[in-house]
Amino acid sequence: LCCTHLHLPDCHITIPIEARDEKLGIINLLCTQSYALNEEDLDLLAAIGSQVSEIVANAWLRMKLAEKEEARQALLESLVVAQEDERGRLARELHDGAGQMLTNLLVRIKALEKRTESSDMQQGLETLLDITSETIDQVRDLSYRLRPAALEEFGLSVALQILVDDMVDGLPIEAACNFDLEETALPASIEVTLYRIAQEGLTNILRHANASHIDVELVWENHGVKMCIEDDGCGFAPHYLAATPGVRHLGLISMRERAAMVGGSLELFSAPGKGTTLLVHVPVFEAVDQ
């Protein structure tokens, strides 16, 4: 690059950009013609520098807050994944350890029953068989609840449908499901969170609501996923629940904490005799096809 004429500035003014006693940059004004600056000009330049400093400082602050929020969100999501990994480990130990040992015990009791001629002994062994079989079923159920295979294999919508069907099976309760996620794959942390909240919410309905009908909805709304669980049960006064510590109160706290861990919110609407509505909204920031 060659320049035959180089004009040095006749006037050079530097305006600092500062925020919270920290130097963020400078503004350089160069004039090729001499110009006498009066006090009004200097005040104007100082005001411009102050405004630019404020704009840059605010932008810098927003960037730092966004970085911290991103780091916090990543940490919370990793915590959700870690919790599910631990649940998976426990589920495998139950299935491969206690489950297999109980099955082996069941086989041995049956073999012993065949060799026993005493009617009293056979009756006692039959009782042991019933207890062992029931325990095996409970271990399998607990193992599934700890690590629902349907969630990994088929996604949230199918897993929730299976959960609802299993929980109301054999009960005088009608359940209607409306899932409209268009088979979109959500982040694993969000799917797990919504599934666990639904699991807790449905358990509360079966334990306390005395409901005859349950509606479960899962749809896209406001740049995220909305899950609504509604029942026609006895309802309750929310302020009474908050003032009465107990298992149900702890369950509500747990659901709210789960929603917050993925940046979501949870609301509960109820009144005596008016049923209960559980509303969860979780924003989805990652690019997904809707």
Image (cartoon, rainbow, N blue to C red):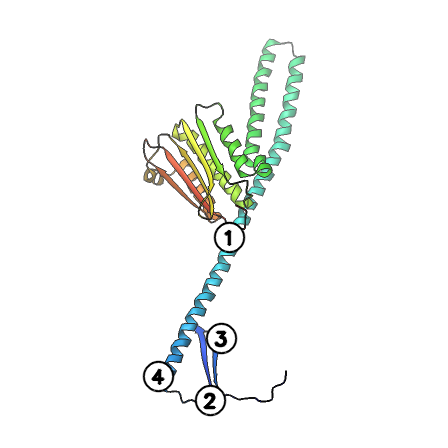
Q: Is residue 92 left or right of residue 204?
A: right
State which tag comes first along the sequence, 2 or 1.
2
Q: Give the label, 4 or 1, closer to the camera.
A: 4
Circle nearer the viewer, 3 or 2: 2
Mark whose residue sits in front, 2 or 1: 2
Q: Say what secondary structure mark 2 lies in.
A: loop
Q: Position of residue 138 (x, y in %)?
A: 55, 27
Residue carrying label 3 = 25
Looking at the image, residue 166 lies above or below residue 57:
above
Question: Residue 34 is drawn in which quadrant?
Answer: bottom left
Q: Which residue is mark 4?
A: 40
- Report how far apart the C-alphas of labels 3 and 2 lie in the structure: 25 Å
Binning the other alpha carbons within 10 Å of mark 3 as few (below 14), some (14 to 19) or many (20 upward) gives few
Q: Nearer the viewer, mark 1 or mark 3?
A: 3
Mark sitting earlier along the chain (1/3) = 3
Asked which secondary structure carries label 4, the reply is: helix
- Residue 63 at least partly seen: yes
Q: Amino acid at mark 4?
A: Glu
At x 64%, y 17%, the residue is 110
The type of residue carrying mark 3 is Gly
Residue 6, picture quadrant = bottom right
Q: Which mark is residue 33?
A: 2
Q: Is residue 195 above or below residue 223?
A: above
| Mark 4 or 3, nearer chain start | 3
**Classed neighbour count for the residue bearing mark 1: other residues with Cα under 10 Å, few (<14), some (14–19), many (≥20):** some
- In the rendering, which numbered label is found on residue 73? 1
Horizontal and vertical percent for residue 62?
46, 62
